[in-house]
Image: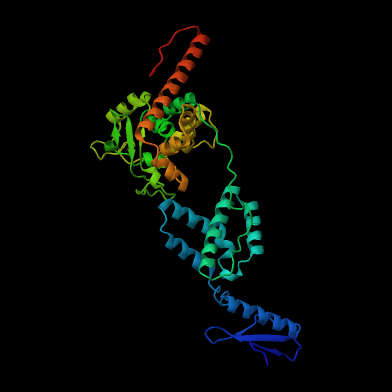
Amino acid sequence: MRRFGAVRQYRSGRWTASYLDLAGERRRAPETFETKTDAEVWLSQVEADLTRGDWRDPDAGAVNFKEYAVKWVDERGLAPTSDELYRRLLRLHILPTFEEYDLDQITPPRVREWRAERRRATGATTVAKSYRLLKAIMETAADDELIRRNPCRIKGAGKEAAAEREIATVAQVDAMANAVGPRWRLMVYLGAYGPMRPEEQAELRRKDVDLDRMTIRVRQAAPELTTGRRVVGDTKSEAGKRVVVLPQFLHKDLRRHLDWYAEKGQDGLLFVGEKGAPFRRSSFGRKWRRARVAVGLPENFRPYDLRHTGHTLATRSGATLRDTMARAGQSSEKAAMIYQHSDLDRQTEVAGGLDQMVRAARRKAVEQANERSGGAEVVRGA
């Protein structure tokens, strides 16, 4: 008589096995076996799992993936932009394949097939983001002991190989600032030499600007969702809440903008449209695209890419990695520590270095133009 479980032979000659689980419920093997020995080996493996504490309820993974994934997003407490992104990736790229499956039916081969199909259908960056999301959801399912192991095991599948972005020159930044028009000119400069994200600039207010010290305090952000809804809230990370010291060459532009375009009152928005409405990505986007074409920058050059110019020039002016990350409000576990050690005095030095470099680049451009024309011209803003 067996010490654990029981085996029995069917009339067909095949064997089945069963055992009592921790709750005393009879559990039967999910398949039949060709020999009695095979059935007994399976029982021995179950007994070993129970002894080690590794046994898992065979029905635990019988949870619909779509229901679990939607609940997973709901429970994360994500920022509006991240919440929108995750739900879009689920809707367009993950659920069409997996929504009918239970968690324990999503196997490594099915994940590989899904990824291969997505790579044929859409861009590599979107596939990498979708894979990371699927992997995160299934990792939580494993932590919840609904599945034994995460089926997302493709090495490097979640990494994005982003193309190298073009870095705008000082002359190109100036040209973009002129091309977008006087109302939005400062936004281009703050993107490059702040360097501030568009959603951070969208929520800047008069009280955040200290014209005498040439500083701007970033307190919040107002990203615009694809639905057009403007969402005011926290910056991308805690490091995004910062005081940015601006180079002195921006003094005239900053003063003029406050006098001519900013909303009235200390709580007035720094950037508003012609009719007094808050900054909208859609309306600014049209001006940006026309300006980009006029300047000759590539089609994929975004307002975010202005930040690369600020990073590059700040580094050349002597800024350390901690300085540039603090100016840009970048965060990770390491970046958060770096941010705390770059103080206002050091940021003023970095802004001073930026000021000298931009002025020098502008003087050189004018001198070259004068040499070609044989004339003389005063360097504006130098």
Is 285 left, or right, of 209 in this rendering? right
Q: How is the image coloured?
A: rainbow
Q: Examine the rendered structure and indicate whether residue 129 appears above or below residue 185.
A: below
Q: Position of residue 176 (x, y in %)?
A: 45, 28
Decide if residue 42 is in sight here.
yes
Q: Is residue 215 left or right of residue 333?
A: left
Q: Position of residue 45 (x, y in %)?
A: 66, 78
Q: Residue at x 53, y 72 (%)?
A: 63
Which quadrant of the figure contains the C terminus?
A: top left
Task: Name the residue at the top extreme.
Answer: 374
Side of 355 relative to 262 (left or right): right
Q: Residue at x 46, y 48 (%)?
A: 333
Residue drawn at (55%, 86%), measured in percent from left and top?
Answer: 25
Number of numbered markers: 0
Query: Residue 255 at x, y = what percent?
Result: 30, 27
The quarter of the picture where the N terminus appears is bottom right
Compared to 25, does 284 lie above or below?
above
Residue 271 visible, this orientation = no
Q: Is residue 214 above or below residue 328?
A: above
User: Closer to the camera, 274 or 338?
Assistant: 338
Question: Which quadrant of the structure image shows residue 7?
Answer: bottom right
Residue 277 occupies quadrant = top left
Instruction: Find residue 228 and report its horizontal and vertical position in percent.
Output: 40, 48
Reply above or below: 380 against 140.
above
Left or right of residue 212, residue 306 in this image: right
